[in-house]
Image (cartoon, helix red, strand yellow):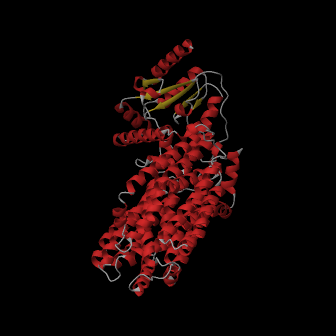
């Protein structure tokens, strides 16, 4: 059984072996992606375009990231949705989502081209282009912009290819494009003397190669098949994928905001210093590309470890969660310390790879600012890496609030204000000191949250697991699903109905059976539709460990339904069994005052606590239902029968029996 293999593999295999298996492909894929941004700058910097050419590509880079933000949002969202469909054996919606994603990516790319083309001069100037570099930036950007649809589709499709179980094909596509780019750059820049135009054409031809390879793969996919009808967007399906990809969009747009603010202040305060505008813009562009390599290695390690962390957290195997965290943290710190050594003691050697500043009036100023930037701006790069790792770790354990705080505290809350404030007192050096100060503050916050989280984990053993069980075989008949407001007595009404009809009753039993199916802990599965935080419901429900639990739960609900007549309470069973003909969907509601009183009576809550718990439970159930169905929980037309639980448990059960008797008579 595949689920048991997964238990033995992710729950028992040596962690360092699992990390090597999963992380190396992630690292290589991310590094290949980074090559597109670095290769052009190296060849441009070593040509007659020199430092001004690097400044020009530096101001184009943030606009690249905007396009990539949309492409990764659509691609990562579709990839996550495809993985969910694979777990459910859902062959119907997987191609719909992939086809819709391709079409929407194409339409979005065309819209971005239409917006950016007439505004290119203003945008490039906003991102720091000077009168010396603006013509180069426009020449480069015009060609890059024309191929935005290819660039965005390539990125989107590669995410889907990885999710289809072919990470090697995805990496081969990206690597082929990068190699073509590397080969054509010297040919176009040095051989044909095309300058910025040559660098741009080398980049887009590389993207075309990657795109063509990706397109060819879609004729031989493993888990779904695309037809022309699938390219007609189905927004009901795609909206779910969109939610799953929103974290990728936020991450990329954060980079854009940082680049915009940083470049604007560098241009402003650079002009007031003897460095001028172009030197700071060129150097910070080089710094960002070099830093991308470092952070991509760290991200590759932690992303590769994410399935290990998620699985063992859901299984409540906290010892392995902590051990995996220690391995990832050790690798992150090692990479950060090695990078710090290079940046502090060899900054000019690193910058030297990007060429000599032949078209800068005072080359010594160029090297002085380069040395200062790498030594100050990247002073605490080990903290930067650890903060990024911490954010992804919290995503893996289904803690989106922690993940968002870890991410934005450094970049948005600290760095952006500091970049705006410090230069007013310390000039252009203030911009450089903003980074280590933001790193320090964010690291303290990340450390505090991590320590608090680790302390909250209680060691549990497999002996705590409930005895193994299986869905009960039942007689043929109606399957009753009951959704209910918190405190409406829906669970008790369902139990009475099951007794009256002499059929199995499933409530917490669903979680226990799903735990056996997936290897996750029954308490974790039991809480997925009630434990989501009051904010960021969608991000919580999109985390990999929660999606794993949802998939296991839905498979068990279908197995239960296949065994015959039964009563299933909660778990969005009405939606999961939407394709079954013999399902009666019931929603139990009640006045709030009645529900608050019931919660006070059953759980011993104070009135204030009861009101809060009623609202939180209903909000979480609604978010869970909407997340998996894209429909509104409790909306009348989604159910066959709505009944007020406040009339009493027995009267409700009797009324439902009468209705079901009428339905059976009609049949």
| Left or right: residue 617 compared with residue 578 | left
The foreground one among 397 and 468 is 397
Residue shown at 62%/43% (left/top)? Answer: 87
155 vs 478: above or below? below
Q: Position of residue 573 (x, y in %)?
A: 54, 33
Quarter of the image where one finds residue 320: bottom right
The foreground one among 151 and 571 is 151
Q: Position of residue 82 (x, y in %)?
A: 58, 45
382 vs 653: above or below? below
Dividing the image into 4 quarters, which one contains the C terminus? top right
Give the total of numbered labels. 0
Most distant residue in the top direction: 665
Camera sees residue 399: no
| Left or right: residue 393 compared with residue 253 | right
Quarter of the image where one finds residue 601: top left
113 vs 266: above or below? above
Quarter of the image where one finds residue 35: bottom right
The foreground one among 78 and 426 is 78
Camera sees residue 123: yes
Residue shown at 27%/75% (left/top)? Answer: 424
Q: Position of residue 319 (x, y in %)?
A: 60, 59
The foreground one among 212 and 538 is 212
Residue shown at 35%/59% (left/top)? Answer: 119
| Left or right: residue 654 compared with residue 441 | right
Most distant residue in the left direction: 424
Dividing the image into 4 quarters, which one contains the N terminus? top right
Q: Position of residue 416 (x, y in %)?
A: 35, 66
């Amino acid at each position: 059984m595949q689920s048991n293999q997964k238990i033995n593999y992710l729950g028992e295999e040596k962690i360092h072996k699992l990390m090597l298996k999963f992380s190396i492909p992630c690292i290589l894929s991310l590094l290949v992606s980074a090559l597109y941004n670095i290769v052009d700058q190296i060849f441009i910097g070593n040509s007659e375009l020199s430092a001004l050419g690097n400044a020009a590509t530096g101001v184009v880079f943030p606009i690249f990231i905007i396009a990539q933000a949309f492409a990764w949002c659509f691609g990562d969202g579709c990839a996550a949705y495809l993985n969910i469909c694979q777990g459910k054996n859902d062959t119907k919606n997987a191609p719909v989502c992939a086809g819709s994603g391709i079409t929407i990516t194409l339409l979005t790319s065309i819209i971005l081209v239409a917006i950016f083309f007439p505004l290119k001069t203003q945008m490039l100037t906003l991102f720091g282009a000077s009168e010396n570099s603006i013509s180069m930036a426009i020449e480069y950007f015009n060609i890059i912009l024309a191929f935005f649809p290819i660039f965005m589709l390539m990125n989107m499709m590669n995410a889907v290819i990885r999710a289809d179980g072919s990470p090697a094909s995805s990496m081969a596509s990206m690597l082929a494009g990068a190699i073509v780019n590397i080969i054509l750059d010297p040919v176009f820049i040095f051989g044909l003397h095309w300058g910025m135009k040559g660098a741009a054409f080398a980049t887009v031809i590389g993207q075309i190669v990657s795109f063509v390879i990706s397109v060819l793969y879609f004729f031989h996919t493993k888990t779904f098949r695309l037809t022309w009808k699938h390219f007609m967007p189905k927004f009901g399906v795609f909206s779910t994928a969109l939610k799953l990809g929103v974290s990728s969009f936020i991450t990329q747009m954060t980079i854009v905001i940082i680049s915009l603010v940083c470049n604007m202040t560098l241009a402003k305060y650079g002009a007031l210093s003897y460095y001028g505008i172009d030197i700071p813009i060129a150097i910070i562009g080089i710094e960002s590309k070099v830093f991308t390599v470092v952070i991509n290695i760290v991200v590759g390690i932690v992303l590769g470890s994410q399935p290990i962390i998620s699985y063992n957290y859901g299984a409540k195997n906290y010892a392995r969660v902590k051990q995996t965290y220690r391995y990832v943290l050790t690798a992150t710190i090692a990479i950060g310390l090695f990078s710090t050594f290079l940046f502090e003691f060899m900054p000019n050697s690193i910058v030297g790879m990007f060429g000599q500043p032949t078209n800068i009036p005072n080359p010594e100023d160029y090297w002085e600012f380069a040395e200062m930037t790498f030594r100050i701006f990247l002073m605490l790069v080990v903290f930067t890496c650890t903060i990024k790792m911490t954010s992804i770790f919290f995503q893996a354990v289904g803690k989106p609030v922690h993940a968002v705080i870890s991410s934005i505290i450094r970049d948005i809350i600290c760095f952006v204000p500091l970049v705006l404030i410090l230069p007013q007192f310390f000039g252009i050096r203030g911009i450089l000191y903003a980074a280590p100060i933001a790193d320090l503050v964010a690291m303290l916050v990340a450390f505090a949250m991590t320590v608090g989280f680790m302390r909250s984990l209680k060691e549990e053993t497999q002996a705590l697991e409930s005895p193994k069980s299986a869905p009960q075989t039942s007689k043929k008949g109606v399957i009753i699903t009951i959704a209910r407001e918190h405190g409406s007595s829906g669970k008790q009404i369902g139990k009475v109905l099951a007794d009256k009809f002499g059929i199995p009753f499933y409530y917490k039993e669903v979680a226990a059976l799903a735990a056996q199916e997936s290897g996750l802990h029954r308490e974790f599965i039991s809480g997925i539709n009630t434990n989501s935080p009051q904010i960021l419901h969608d991000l919580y429900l999109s985390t990999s460990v929660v999606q794993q639990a949802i998939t296991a739960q839905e498979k068990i609900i279908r197995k239960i339904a296949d065994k015959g007549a039964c009563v299933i309470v909660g778990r969005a069973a009405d939606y999961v069994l939407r394709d079954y003909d013999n399902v009666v969907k019931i929603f139990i509601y009640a006045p709030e005052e009645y529900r608050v009183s019931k919660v006070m009576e059953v759980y011993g809550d104070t009135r204030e606590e009861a009101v809060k718990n009623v609202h939180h439970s209903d909000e979480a159930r609604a978010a869970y239902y909407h997340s998996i169905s894209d429909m509104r929980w409790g909306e009348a037309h989604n159910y066959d029968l709505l009944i007020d639980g406040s009339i009493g448990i027995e009267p409700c059960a009797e009324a439902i029996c009468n209705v079901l008797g009428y339905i059976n008579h009609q049949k």
